[in-house]
Image: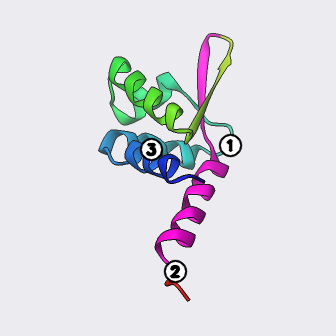
Amino acid sequence: MEISNAVERLSALAQASRLSIFRRLIQAGPGGMAAGDISQELAIPPPTLSFHLKDLTRSGLIRAQREGRSIIYQADYQAINDLIGYLKLNCCQRPV
C-alpha cells in the first residue's frame, strides 16, 4: 500500500459520521446494509449520508452494489486489513 492510500483511508475515517457508518457496516457483516437502513439507524439525513458514503467508497473502505431499487453498502474487509497491516509495518515497528 502506498502512503497516499493509507492517508486517504485514514482521512475518510477521521470524521465522526463516517466512522460511525464504517463501524455499522463492519457490524453488518459481508451482507452489508441498504443506504436507507443506515440512514435510519444512525439518524443521518439521506443527503448527508450520501456525501459520507461517497467519501468512504472513494477511499476504498466500502463498496456499493445495486440490488433492485436499493444500493447495498458493504465494508471492504481486505481494505481495512491492508490499512492495519500498513500501519503495523510502517508505523509500529522499530528499525532493526
Q: Which residue is mark 1?
A: 30
| Magenta region includes residue 83 | yes
Q: Quadrant of the C terminus?
A: bottom right
* Marks 3, 1: nearer the viewer: 3
Taking depth in this image into account, of 13 and 20 the one nearest to the observer is 13
Residue pictured at 38% horizontal, 24% vertical: 51
Residue type at mark 2 is Gln
Tell me if label 3 and label 2 are in contact, CB under 8 Å: no
> Is residue 84 covered in magenta?
yes
| Mark nearer the N terminus (3 vs 2) | 3
Q: Amino acid at mark 3?
A: Glu
Q: Nearer the viewer, residue 17 or 87?
A: 87
Disc number for residue 93: 2
Which comes before the other along the chain, label 3 or label 1? Answer: 3
Circle 3 residue: 8
Location of residue 41 in the rendering, given as x and y in whole percent from the top left corner:
41, 34
Number of other residues with Cα within 10 Å of mark 3, as a class: few under 14, some 14 to 19, many 20 or more: some
Residue 20 shows in the view: no
Tell me what residue is drawn at x 33 percent, y 31 percent.
43
Q: Is residue 91 left or right of residue 30?
A: left
Residue farthest toward the front in the current orientation of the protein: 96
Circle 2: element type: loop
Residue interval drawn in magenta: 69-93
Q: Secondary structure at mark 1?
A: loop
Three-letter amino acid code at disc 1? Pro
Quick one: 45 or 96, which is closer to the camera?
96
Determine contact: label 2, label 1, CB under 8 Å.
no
Mark positioned earlier in the residue sequence (2 or 1): 1
Q: Is residue 51 visible?
A: yes
